[in-house]
């Protein structure tokens, strides 16, 4: 398994070019209970702050997905009322995790993919599903274009394929694209990128791993937040950054990072 270098995104607006290999692509966003989200930040943020941060990040992700022309439908999976309200706001679907009859991220995503594959609603067959996580505030349209283009290339010679966009450490699966009817065995958790790649190859599915700068920036720890702020993004993560500053979190992190024991790059501050 090899991970390519960070790829530069290119802006291609021809929707038919991207969707030709798919027939129909759906996006799937599994969302935990917002109150229980981001437990690894418990030593840095309060319960209320973690909930507010997660809500802001999900909004950043949904804003990009809802505006992108490649998705036939977008589905969030959650029993949290906040997720239902967001789905209504963005005009997308919300499936109840409870109604899927399973629990745990891997089981929930697998059940949702199976439901997509078996839909009989008079709609075109769902031939590709993009599983996106809610903690990717730097997700952008241009990188989605790159991801879809690369998956399309792989699909030109295969009926099914798997594309993984990894995290900045090359270990996680921040986005996974697959045929919902032939999804690899899911293994979200530690080293999921390698596990998903191995599962795909075990099924004789062509697989590739991409490292895309914005998509790679998932937020799980204090260090991830500090890294996000140090990047000084100008157009992405708008709601996330606004929340971090309005809640005073960015200022706290700046104080921690600028202490005498830490000489790393100063945290970006709002003007």
Image (cartoon, helix red, strand yellow):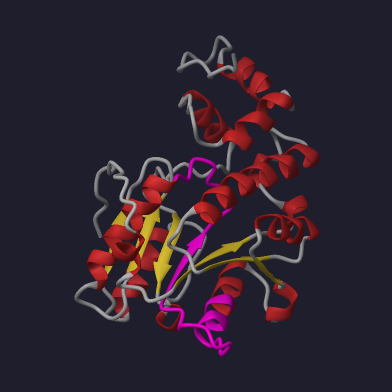
In this view, 92 is above or below 114: above
Q: Which residues are magenta?
A: 112-140
* Magenta segment includes 214: no
Q: Nearer the viewer, residue 158 or 34?
A: 158
In this view, 198 is above or below 209: below
In this view, 170 is above or below 19: above
Q: Residue at x 74, y 75 (%)?
A: 98
| Residue extending farthest left | 157
Percent x, y of residue 258: 56, 13
* Magenta segment includes 137: yes
190 to the left or right of 44: left
Percent x, y of residue 70: 43, 62
Q: Residue at x 42, y 41 (%)?
A: 214
Q: Residue at x 72, y 25 (%)?
A: 246
The N terminus is located in which quarter? bottom left
195 to the left or right of 218: left
Q: Residue at x 45, y 76 (%)?
A: 185
211 to the left or right of 251: left
Percent x, y of residue 24: 43, 74
Q: Magenta span: helix, strand or loop, mainly? A: loop
Q: How many numbered markers are drawn?
A: 0
Percent x, y of residue 250: 64, 24
């Amino acid at each position: 398994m090899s991970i390519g270098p960070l790829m530069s995104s290119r802006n291609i607006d021809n929707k038919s070019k991207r969707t030709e290999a798919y027939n129909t692509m759906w996006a799937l966003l599994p969302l935990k209970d917002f109150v229980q989200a981001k437990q690894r930040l418990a030593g840095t943020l309060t319960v209320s702050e973690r909930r507010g941060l997660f809500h802001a990040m999900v909004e950043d992700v949904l804003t990009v997905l809802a505006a992108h022309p490649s998705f036939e439908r977008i589905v969030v999976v959650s029993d949290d009322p906040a997720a239902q309200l967001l789905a209504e706001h963005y005009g997308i679907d919300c499936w109840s995790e409870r109604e899927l009859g399973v629990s745990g991220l891997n089981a929930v995503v697998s059940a949702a993919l199976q439901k997509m594959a078996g839909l009989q609603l008079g709609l075109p067959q769902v031939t590709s599903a993009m599983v996106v996580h809610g903690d990717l505030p730097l997700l952008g349209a241009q990188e989605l274009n790159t991801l879809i283009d690369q998956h399309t290339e792989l699909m030109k010679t295969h009926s099914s394929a798997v594309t993984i966009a990894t995290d900045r450490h090359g270990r996680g699966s921040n986005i996974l694209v697959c045929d919902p009817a032939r999804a690899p065995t899911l293994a979200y958790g530690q080293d999921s990128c390698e596990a998903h790649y191995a599962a795909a190859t075990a099924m004789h599915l062509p697989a590739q791993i991409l490292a895309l700068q914005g998509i790679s920036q998932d937020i799980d720890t204090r260090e991830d937040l500090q890294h996000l702020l140090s990047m000084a993004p100008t157009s992405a993560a708008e709601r996330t950054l606004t929340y971090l500053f309005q809640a005073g979190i960015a200022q706290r992190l700046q104080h921690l990072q600028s202490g005498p024991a830490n000489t790393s790059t100063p945290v970006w501050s709002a003007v």
